[in-house]
Image (cartoon, grey):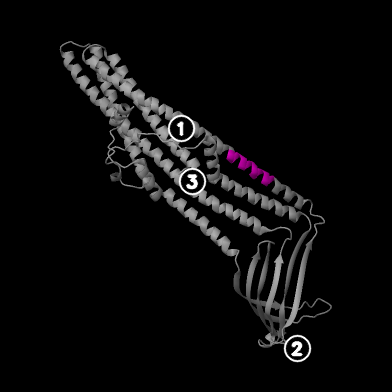
Amino acid sequence: MRKVLTTLLLLLGCALSRAQGLEEFIRLAQDSTITAFQSQYEYESGQARYARFEALRKPQLTLQFKPNYNRIITDISREFVFLRNYDRFSTSAQLMLTQKVLPWGGDAYVGSHAVWSEYFLKDSQNRPRDFVATPLVVGYQQSLLGYNPFRWEKAEEDQRLEAARKEYSFRLYRIAEETSRRYFRLVCAQGMLDMCERNKQTADTLYAIAREKAGIAMITLAELRSLELQRLNAANALLSARSEEKLAKESLLSYLRADEDLLPARLPVPTHTRTIPLSDEDALQMAFDKSAGIQLQQTAVTQARGKQVKARKEGGVKVGVDLNMGMQQLADNFLGAYKNPQFYMVGVVTLSIPLMDHGAAKKGHAAAVAWEKREEQALLEVERALKEDVQLTLDNIRSHEILLEHTQEAVALADEVFELTAENYANGLCDINTYSLAQSRRDSAYNQYLTALAGYWNTYYHLLTLTQHE
């Protein structure tokens, strides 16, 4: 096997001592590609969103001003008039400290409030201004008893942050997978170019020898024309190989956002396969645990369940509360409004009973239930697709590993057969057809080896992407 590997490396023309390997290109891609930058920014956005969510669950202190202008005109068509024509300008100032009560689902608040109102009357029977001061108010409000939106929000945001983290890690592995695909495309193109250059050189040499032999009638005209055709085909194949090698190189450099100086003359090729020390069950479990797609769909399921619970609570009797107490005073000057404040307590209970809504609440809950089931089925489908992908990848990597070993042996054998056939043809022991068949078999074996090589490593990095195995 050592001899076979040495032969393959010579065929590929690798300069391992001075060339960069695939791992270096992957690290470069993860640091410099546009996809890497986008993934980093998306992850930072997810982190900032979660930090904002956490910050809003802490105590919030707000200072608020509300200037207001009213113009009231008496309706003279009424039989009694208790309003007078006037313009009213008012300004309120409020300092409020609020805190979400996470176990219950409501908001507690404490603060201070002051209102100044200025009246512009056409008569002076009423006071020209008043001040209402509330030095202290403490209260609690909740719009829907029995439903805690904060619990569902917490579950959703935790899952979104975890999904963002998994998505970032997943995309880094996808960058490695894409780099591997472009890397081995160039490896195969360079290998095919080497093969075509050898074939072109051999065809030129044989054609030159055949022309000398034709001059002394040692070969037939048909054999000479066959060698000429073989020489022309080799030249055309070389042109195609150079074009493919150029395209593959540009594809890799474009993805890495690097200059051509980064690439060595020939890319190094891994000489040994790698195995991930995982059983099928462990690989599947790791893929499930690291899957950003599953995490995102689980978030969608949680969100749908929260909406379903809310729709069910809103479908019956809705009860809300707003309880507050504090000190308050009314006066015609600012300082007077803060003298001798009076204690007050207010309790508001909102009770809403749907007597006739034409089934709106019931249909709304049915829609929420249907959507919850839809998201649950979508989660099962994501899990099924991932399981299928993992199992297929495991099967493929085993098949490619066996195929790579067999094609390595085939290349060594085909190269040996071709050398013997070429020697026999030079000694006149076989005809041109036998020689061409040996060359075709060697080229086919080498092409199959390159395909198996790229297939194995692309599948290997795809399995790494799925399992994110270190």
- The mark lying in front, picked from 3 and 1, is 1
Q: Residues within 10 Å of mark 1 (few under 14, many from 20)?
A: many
Question: How far apart are labels 3 and 1 at the CA level?
Answer: 20 Å
Q: Which residues are magenta?
A: 370-383
Q: Which mark is residue 170?
A: 3
Amino acid type, callout 2:
Gln
Q: Residue at x 77, y 65 (%)?
A: 350
Q: Residue at x 44, y 39 (%)?
A: 461
Q: Can you tell which quarter of the image residue 321 is in?
A: bottom right
Picture layout, residue 123 above or below residue 95: below
Precedes in sequence: disc 2 or disc 3: 2
Q: Position of residue 21 (x, y in %)?
A: 34, 41
Q: Position of residue 8 (x, y in %)?
A: 31, 29
Q: Is residue 371 magenta?
A: yes
Instruction: Tell me the SS state at disc 2.
Output: loop
388 lies left or right of 406: right
Which quadrant does the C terminus fall into?
A: top left
Q: Residue at x 46, y 40 (%)?
A: 464
Amino acid type, callout 3:
Phe
Look at mark 2 in the image and give the residue it sits on: 125
Q: Can you tell which quarter of the image residue 410 is in?
A: top left
Q: Which mark is residue 397?
A: 1
382 lies left or right of 36: right
Is the magenta region chiefly helix, strand or loop?
A: helix
Q: Is residue 119 visible?
A: yes
Instruction: Tell me the SS state at disc 3.
Output: helix
Precedes in sequence: disc 3 or disc 1: 3
Q: Residues within 10 Å of mark 3 (few under 14, many from 20)?
A: many
Amino acid type, callout 1:
Ile
Which quadrant does the N terminus fall into?
A: top left
Q: Which mark is residue 429?
A: none
Instruction: Tell me the SS state at disc 1.
Output: helix
